[in-house]
Image: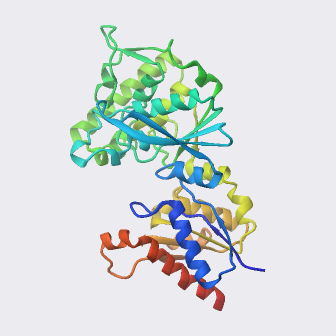
């Protein structure tokens, strides 16, 4: 009987998608064991690559779209996914409102908005989907999902009763909301948030303080943004009679987690757990002799809901060996061996410059897999 390998990597940031990593792993395995049985399960954790991983694993299709970017004057050509014979949409908020869409000099969470994400949700509703999965990683926004809500029909009014175009920097001007035009189809659609963070909306662990600086916020902006989110949460709680600001994950994607819960009744899930369920990873790993996973960096943070950790947990349940490959193996990986990892392998040659590592990532992964598989055969 040929050996069965389940390949379940995440993307390697800036160098390979999860599907490309999975293909590189296959080439490495079949270089040593030509008749190996390979099961591809490209993975993600709700962040970058979630749409691609689900389209690839579930044989779905991508739907091209033209939406508003992080800044109101921007138009973005992007896409979202349709799986489950058209019943389920998969949306990655970063594809419309992600940090990679702005140059560092343009990033300013006072000005950015999630309006484009709302437009993608509306397009999915237009196609009659019954469920929408929304991945929240990689945002450049801090508007509590107000822009998204505006695209779906919510009207935000200031003290003078005038309509305002909301963004992170002017949420403190919102005095009331008119929900009468909120898209009624949302009530009949299951919306699930896939998040890899569990931060609340406001405060020392909230969206603005923890994530604001990487989105271009100065210390003064961070303070203002946090106050704005608190004010906005007060207005929302007063009008809808429910306060989501303290829910774990409300602060994901600059508070988009909060906005989705408040305006679309979305439920929130660990991104990797949701992916494991969607791609039926348990059933696939049950058949495996060996499980390979990986992503760009593996370190002490991996155990906080990252893809390789989720994969290792499933493999541990079935008592299957797991080998993780990483572009960079960081500090504090000792705990991971107790969590199901058999081996953690850095794929790059010693002292390899970053640019070279990124350019040669597929080749380096393939080579690393060849060496590991040779070793497996001699054990």
Instruction: Give the vertical position of 97 relative to 46 (above or below).
Output: above
Q: Residue furthest top?
A: 160
Residue 245 appears in the figure: no
Taking the image as shown, residue 249 lies to the left or right of residue 321, namely left
Q: Position of residue 242 (x, y in %)?
A: 54, 23
Q: Which residue is drawn at 63% across and 38% down?
A: 88
Instruction: Give the vertical position of 351 relative to 261 (above or below).
Output: below
Q: How many numbered circles are shown?
A: 0
Q: Residue furthest bottom?
A: 378
Q: Nearer the viewer, residue 73 or 222?
A: 73
Q: Quadrant of the C terminus?
A: bottom right
Q: Residue at x 45, y 39 (%)?
A: 200
Taking the image as shown, residue 148 lies to the left or right of residue 284, namely left
Q: Which residue is drawn at 42% across and 71% down?
A: 361
Taking the image as shown, residue 285 lies to the left or right of residue 16, namely right
Q: Position of residue 58 (x, y in %)?
A: 65, 51
Q: Nearer the viewer, residue 352 or 222?
A: 352
Instruction: Give the vertical position of 315 relative to 145 (above or below).
Output: below
Q: Residue at x 66, y 36 (%)?
A: 87
Residue 194 appears in the figure: yes
Taking the image as shown, residue 119 lies to the left or right of residue 103, namely right
Q: In which quarter of the image is residue 206?
A: top left
Q: Which of 33 and 212 is in front in this view?
A: 33
- Judging from the image, the colouring scheme is rainbow
Q: Where is residue 49 in the image (x, y as percent from the top left)?
A: 49, 53
Instruction: Give the vertical position of 196 relative to 286 (above or below).
Output: above
Q: Position of residue 241 (x, y in %)?
A: 53, 18
Q: Quadrant of the N terminus?
A: bottom right
């Amino acid at each position: 009987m040929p050996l069965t390998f389940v390949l379940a990597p995440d993307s390697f940031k800036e160098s390979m998608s999860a599907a490309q990593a999975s293909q590189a792993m296959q080439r490495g395995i079949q270089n040593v064991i030509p008749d190996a049985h390979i099961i591809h399960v490209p993975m993600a954790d709700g962040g970058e690559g979630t749409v691609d991983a689900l389209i690839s694993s579930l044989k779905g299709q991508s739907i091209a779209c033209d939406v508003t970017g992080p800044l109101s004057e921007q138009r973005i050509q992007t896409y979202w996914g349709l799986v489950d014979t058209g019943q389920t949409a998969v949306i990655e908020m970063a594809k419309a409102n992600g940090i990679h869409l702005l140059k560092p000099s343009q990033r300013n969470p006072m000005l950015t908005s999630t309006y484009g994400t709302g437009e993608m949700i509306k397009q999915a509703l237009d196609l009659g989907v019954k469920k929408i999965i929304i991945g929240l990683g990689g945002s450049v926004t801090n508007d509590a999902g107000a822009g998204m809500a505006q695209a779906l029909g919510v009207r935000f009014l200031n003290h003078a009763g005038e309509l305002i175009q909301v963004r992170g920097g002017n949420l403190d001007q919102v005095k009331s909301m008119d929900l009468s035009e909120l898209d009624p189809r949302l009530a009949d659609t299951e919306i699930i948030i896939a998040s890899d963070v569990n931060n609340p909306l406001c405060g020392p662990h909230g969206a603005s303080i923890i994530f604001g600086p990487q989105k271009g916020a100065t210390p003064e902006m961070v303070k203002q943004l946090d106050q704005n989110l608190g004010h906005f949460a007060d207005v929302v709680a007063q009008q809808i009679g429910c306060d989501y600001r303290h829910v774990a994950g409300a602060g994901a994607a600059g508070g988009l987690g909060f906005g989705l819960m408040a305006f679309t009744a979305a439920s929130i899930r660990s991104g990797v757990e949701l992916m494991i369920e969607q791609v039926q990873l348990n059933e696939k790993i049950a058949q495996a002799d060996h499980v390979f996973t990986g992503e760009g960096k593996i370190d002490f943070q991996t155990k906080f809901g990252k893809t390789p950790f989720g994969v290792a947990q499933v493999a541990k349940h079935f008592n299957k060996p797991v080998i993780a490959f990483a572009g960079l193996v960081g500090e504090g990986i000792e705990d991971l061996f107790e969590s199901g990892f058999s081996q953690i392998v850095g794929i790059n040659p010693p002292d390899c410059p970053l640019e070279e590592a990124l350019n040669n990532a597929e080749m380096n992964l393939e080579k690393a897999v060849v060496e590991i598989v040779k070793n497996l055969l001699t054990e």
